[in-house]
Image (cartoon, rainbow, N blue to C red):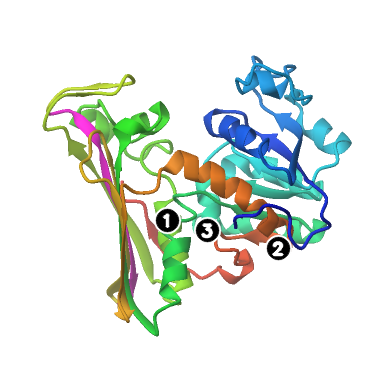
Amino acid sequence: MFPNSLGGLSGKKAKAILYGIGAIGSEVAKYALEKEWLQIVGAVDTDSSKTGRDLGQVIGLKRDIGVEVTGDPAALLKHIEADVVILTTGSFFRSIYDQLDVIARARIHVVTTAEELAFPSLQNPELAKRLDEVAKGSGASIMGVGINPGFVMDSLVVYLAAACLEVERVKVKRVVNSSLRRKQLQLKVGAGLSLEEFKTNLGKRIFGHIGLLESAALVADGINMRPDKIFQSIEPVVAQRAASTGYVEVKAGKVAGMRQVARCLKGGKECVELEVQFYLDAPDPRDEIFIEGKPNVDVIIKDGIFGDQATVAILIHSIPTVLNAKPGLLTATGKGVSETFWQCPVELGY
């Protein structure tokens, strides 16, 4: 996961296409340029202010790197030889399915930040089956990765649980001071809204923390407790005093952020509980993992893992894993999606 080279591959540089040059995509590009084992050979974005320009200028390097941003991914995939596409265009499986399908049919591997791809069969089983078949047929591997979902509340938990002879229950809490995070996150957790506006926004696909249900499924599957039901709840965190971030102004009594919880039930008992708190000026930010078992595992990561930087790192560090993986659609833990088609009702909680 932390390569200086491609290890078991040919020793040549991996050729990568960046698909999506937004806030995360730009940081991915900068980090990728530091890696001697990785070469950026193409870049795609639909923003007309970016297309036709050199990638180095678009990401703020003030120098050309010899890669032009294009708005025509099909043409690029047809004419550029690449090993992997780093896809950072969206969160939802359905909205990026066509992008993934085109890439897979071009026989190119994918790592993506799409949150629903952490456990793609949970909410989109038919799409997952279809894409898995396409990827297997072309020899491509597709994996959704990231910090949350993808690591701190799921893959890391499954890894730690390997130290237990038995696991009874898993409880994870992630507290994030969203004052330190980018504007998009502050807005999608409701900072600055009234309580009535918060309620109105519930159920909108772009609102709240995306992927918590997928993390819960990933943990339950990883500890061999395939659940009978997964559900989540979302509630506002109300500001006790005024706060300002440069992006939003929040008065006392307005919404500072949100608390979201996903739970898995098996045999009427809770086996997994994942809780995220994202709100302005949240005190004592941290990641807590408690595994009740034989033995118990109790881990606290002080200040929590900073999501934006960690997501960039995981995307790049996952490339050798994906290039060496078996073909098909994979979960964030690398498990073939064809192994995850267990039936489980999901309640979204709004």
**Residue shown at the point (73%, 55%) measured from the top left:** 6
Disc 3 packing (10 Å; few <14; some 14–19; many ≥20)? many
Q: Is residue 275 visible?
A: no
Residue 220 left/right relative to 267: right
Direction from residue 256 to residue 80 in the image, left or right: right
Disc 3 marks which amino acid? Phe
Q: Quadrant of the N terminus?
A: bottom right
- In this rendering, the label closer to the viewer, 3 or 2: 2
SS of the residue at dot 1? loop
Disc 1 + disc 2, Cβ < 8 Å: no
Q: Which residue is mark 1?
A: 152
In the image, residue 70 lies at what x, y percent? 75, 24
Q: Are marks 3 and 2 in contact (CB under 8 Å)?
A: no
Q: Which residues are magenta?
A: 253-267
Magenta stretch: includes residue 190: no
> Residue 247's mark?
none
> In which image quadrant can residue 56 be found?
top right
Q: Which residue is mark 3?
A: 119
Secondary structure of the residue carrying numbered label 3: loop
Q: Amino acid at mark 2?
A: Ala
Q: Which of marks 2 and 1 precedes in the sequence?
A: 1
Marks 3/2: CA–CA distance: 16 Å
Name the residue at 64% across, 20% down. 58
Residue at image position (69%, 55%) is 320
Decide: few, some or many residues near mark 1? Use Cα within 10 Å; few <14, some 14-19, many ≥20: many
User: Marks 3 and 1, Cα distance to the nearest angstrom?
Assistant: 15 Å
